[in-house]
Image: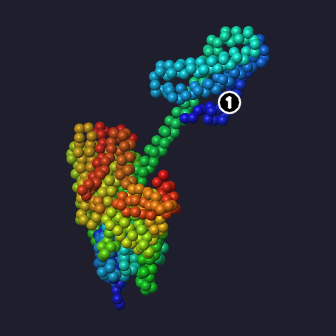
Amino acid sequence: MKKIGAIIIEDEKPARDLIKKFMEDREELELLGEYDNGFSGLKATHELEPDVLFLDVQMPKLNGFELIELLDCAPEIIFTTAYDQYAIKAFEQNAVDYLLKPFSKERFNEGVDRLLVRLEQGSGKKTTEKIRKHLSDSEELLNRVVIKKSGKIHVVAVSDIQYLEAQDDYVMIYTQQGRFLKQQTMKYYEKHLDSDQFIRVHRSFIVNVQVIERIEPYEKTNYILLLADGNKVPVSRSGMQVLKDKLDF
Amino acid sequence: MSHPITSRRRSLVIYILVWFLIFAINAAIIYFLQGFAVKIAIADSFISNFVFAVVGLLAWYPTRYIPYQQSSPVYSIMAHIVAGLLVILVWLTVTVGLLTTLHYGNDLYKDFLNRTLFWRGVVGSLFYLVLVLVFYLVVYAKNLKERAQAEERLKTLVRESELNVLKSQINPHFLFNSLNSISSLTMSSPDEAHKMIIRLSDLLRYSLKNRENEFVTLEEEIGRMQDYLAIEKIRFGEKLRYNLSVPQSCKKIELPTMILQPLIENAIKHGVYESVDPVDIEFNCVMHTDFLELSIVNDYDPDQPPSRGTGLGLQNVTQRILLAYEGKGHVDAKGENGKYNVRIFIPVKKAKKP
């Protein structure tokens, strides 16, 4: 029988040791590797293609959710976390499993049993999609954005974003460090960026108000924004109204 | 502050009614005691009193803009005498002028007007005095109310910060993760697990003291922070390095309990949690002539955007230091060259317990 390949991504050694210890008694599972941060965990997941990730949420470099955002494959996920009320509680127990630290051996085995059922159904893709959907439905504001660009991963602070431009199914994010293409919707960013700082000035543009240098009339009824770095962004009529309300002029 | 009489309908009505009463009495006196015709009595009383009712409203402004407590009383009194004389002068000129023109061919009345000029001035001054007193009462009452409100606000603020202090106790995230580590250690190294439980218990017991806002010696506070870091060390291993040294001269200094805990927690959160390389946390204490400087320095990656952070811990410590030392202590934080440095300055003379 082919074993189930597992990877542990968790920054605390005692926590990794515990999972390993519990895994010893489950012969169906085979440990492919253990990693103490999101970057190396993501890389290993792409290389080793495990069936399941035991994934901590809070980790250096990339947290568990950001890792899932960047995954190219779709392994099953079992979250292990201590206390993450807003991130975890909305998951349905059966859709995505999570082990609340500290957890018992019984609880661990229960999680593995459920995992076997899910693997049988081949629901890995559904799991990652569910997590992604849950994250985009949440009300939480972003502090940073993770982006993959030519094989490298960039973590961009939201305050470094100058503006965003819609490009078909993608959004181009313009930052001080260059521009990054991300598969995401404008609506998502409109919702997850602080609306006092980021304003949707146009159907295709969201601008960080801090980089606006000037607002100039353009043609007869339109306006255009001049940004600190010299770029120009068009403003729609309704966008102008929002700008007026937010910036109070 | 708007005019207390004209800006409120109710006070305006009362004001007018009072003047009607004065008008009626005055008219009666002129009619019955001086024996002038009804027409004259009514005209004299009506004009004198209602002109005063209008001009007298002006007395509000000197009252409002010459606050009694803030300037010297002599200055206030002088200012009111000048303002009062002006009001009376305007009033007398208008009323006597009007009444002389209107004297209905009665020379006796004209004579009466001239004779009573001085007394009219005296009565006007009395009216003015009463109005000023009323206005001062209004200002006083208003100030009293404002002060009570300000005190209430301050009390709420203090209460809120006290609540925050309670909230800033041991973070549940830390607690559950530590318990998870202990659960792991019970299998791999029971001795270590035992030590960790003792440390965690000491730390928890100590954190409960926070509720009473007690003062403790720096030595004790640092002892508990050693426990805290020892627990974190088991979780993070080589990634966390720390050195909390307290010079002999600082050991007995007293400070609010758990004042360093949020800062150490921050150092771990922004240093260790976000890093894959070893992070150093260092505590220092320097005694200056009349104040003490405590500092916590940790490595951090300034290029790494924070995954989540609210700055509540630092805000809390700042507020507590301000309250505990009645504004004589302060906190300062800055990050440069990959080191984050938080410094607490407190006066050396032991502060009063809050």
| Closer to the camera in the image, B284 or A49 | A49
The amino acid type of the residue labelled 1 equals Ile
User: Visible in this render: residue B53?
Assistant: yes
Q: Position of residue B188 (x, y in %)?
A: 28, 71
Q: Position of residue B227 (x, y in %)?
A: 29, 57
Residue with the mark numbered 1? B14
* Residue sitting farthest toward the left: B248
| Closer to the camera in the image, B92 or A191 | B92
Per the image, label 1 sits on a secondary structure element best described as helix
Q: Quadrant of residue B5?
A: top right
State left or right for residue B273 relative to residue A221. Answer: left
**Other-residue count near label 1 (Cα within 10 Å), few / some / many at <14 / 14–19 / ≥20:** few
Residue A145 to residue B167: above or below: below
Chain of residue at mark 1: B
* Residue sitting farthest toward the right: B38
Residue shown at 43% from the left, 70% from the top? A166
Residue B71 to residue A134: above or below: above
Residue shown at 71% from the left, 22% from the top? B46
